[in-house]
Image (cartoon, rainbow, N blue to C red):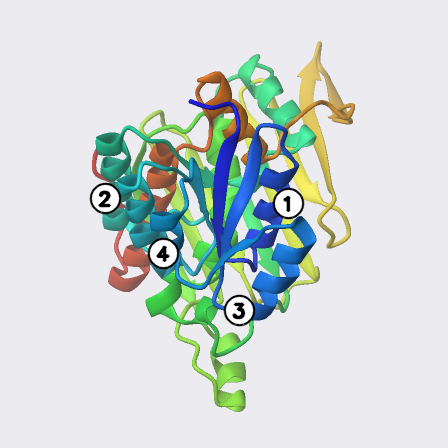
Amino acid sequence: MSDLQRVGVIGLGIGRNHVKSFHSHEHSEVVAICDQSEARLSEIGDEHKISARYRDAAEMIATEKLDIVAIATPNKLHKPLTLMAFEAGCHVFCEKPMAMNTIEAREMLEAGRVAGKRLMINFGFRFSPQSWALKKEVDRGTLGDIYYARTQWLRRRGMPGFGGWFGTKALSGGGALIDLGVHRLDLALWLMGYPRPVWVMGSTYNHIASDLAKQQGKAFDVEDFAVGLVKFDNGATLEIEASWAGNIAERELMQTRLLGSKAGLLQQNINGTYEFEAKIYQERDGSQYDMELRPPVPDVPGAAAHFVDALVNDTPHIATGEEGLIVMELLDAIYESSRSGQPVQISAI
């Protein structure tokens, strides 16, 4: 395998960040981009001096000799584009959520195994110095046995544009849970060591966004709030909450809390921003101590850079397709529990 990874990026909304990340790595080069918008193709192609510009993803994958295909499209296209990339002999870097549902996620995993190619899901909230510092504390046993976690991403009002693909179930697979909740769910599971889930209860609601969409005469058929409860085979419990609209005090609230037999931790955003603080709470010799994590700026790669490093060095990568499948199965179970009003058993993954 050549050290220089040739990358093609599909979808230049969120994908514009992938273009920048892959293009700035010394061992990767974005050689082709694809989007339905000529304006985006021109803007990003000119900015990064990429001459191969496509409006058809199949044409790009068939024409360009790519090592990596980065997929940043509506969720409905994740599976077909991933399968297409594997068939062409490419590795895949796919935006979250992995797919529309568990069935699709399993198909993607199997296709990768058959092709002998890698699949990484862009669970970007792992890739920060603070998150890595928290993970090190958990892995060294600072928290002891983790028995409870709660993870949230709540917005007071933060719906995507009505009538777009985010609010259309046939294109997205769901609403706030599959869009926002997926990030915090993966972060909590990663910190916990991805224990095996055994059952799930959940509820979804759409009391605010649906009325606003109707007032604008726009389609919107997904949830604006979701809550789930997950039980694991080690006895631990996880709560997840996600909303695009809810009558809360905060403009935007992101928290992940873990309780362990020796200590607990909390990561939360600061004043509704995308900056985070993290603390560990513990007891020593009968006294309580609060430790704020202020890690130095370590050499923590972004998700795309991590994937390139793993390929070039032939080392394992994190945020694997297998972990994406577990997240997908939990999302499906929350939606199914909401529909049925009953707990959902999780099959062996």
Could you say whether the residue bearing mark 4 is in a helix, strand or loop? helix
Looking at the image, which is closer to me, 293 or 170? Answer: 170
Q: Quadrant of the N terminus?
A: top left
Q: Mark 4 points at which residue?
A: 59
Mark found first going from the N terminus, 4 or 1: 1
Looking at the image, which is closer to me, 346 or 136? Answer: 136
Could you say whether the residue bearing mark 3 is in a helix, strand or loop? loop
Residue 140 is labelled as none
Q: Mark 3 points at which residue?
A: 37
Q: Residues under labels 2 and 3: Cα distance? A: 29 Å
Q: For the residue carrying disc 2, how many other residues have a C-alpha within 10 Å: few (<14), some (14-19), or many (20+)?
A: some
Q: In which quarter of the image is residue 178?
A: bottom left
Q: Mark 2 points at which residue?
A: 107
Q: Where is residue 96 in the image (x, y as percent from the top left)?
A: 45, 48
Q: Which mark is nearer the camera, 4 or 2?
A: 4
Q: Position of residue 324 (x, y in %)?
A: 38, 39
Q: Residues under labels 2 and 1: Cα distance? A: 29 Å
| Looking at the image, residue 204 lies above or below residue 330 | below
- Give yes or no for contact between labels 2 and 1 (Cβ–Cβ under 8 Å): no
Q: For the residue carrying disc 3, how many other residues have a C-alpha within 10 Å: few (<14), some (14-19), or many (20+)?
A: some
Inspect the image, locate mark 2, and give the three-letter code of the amino acid beneath it. Glu
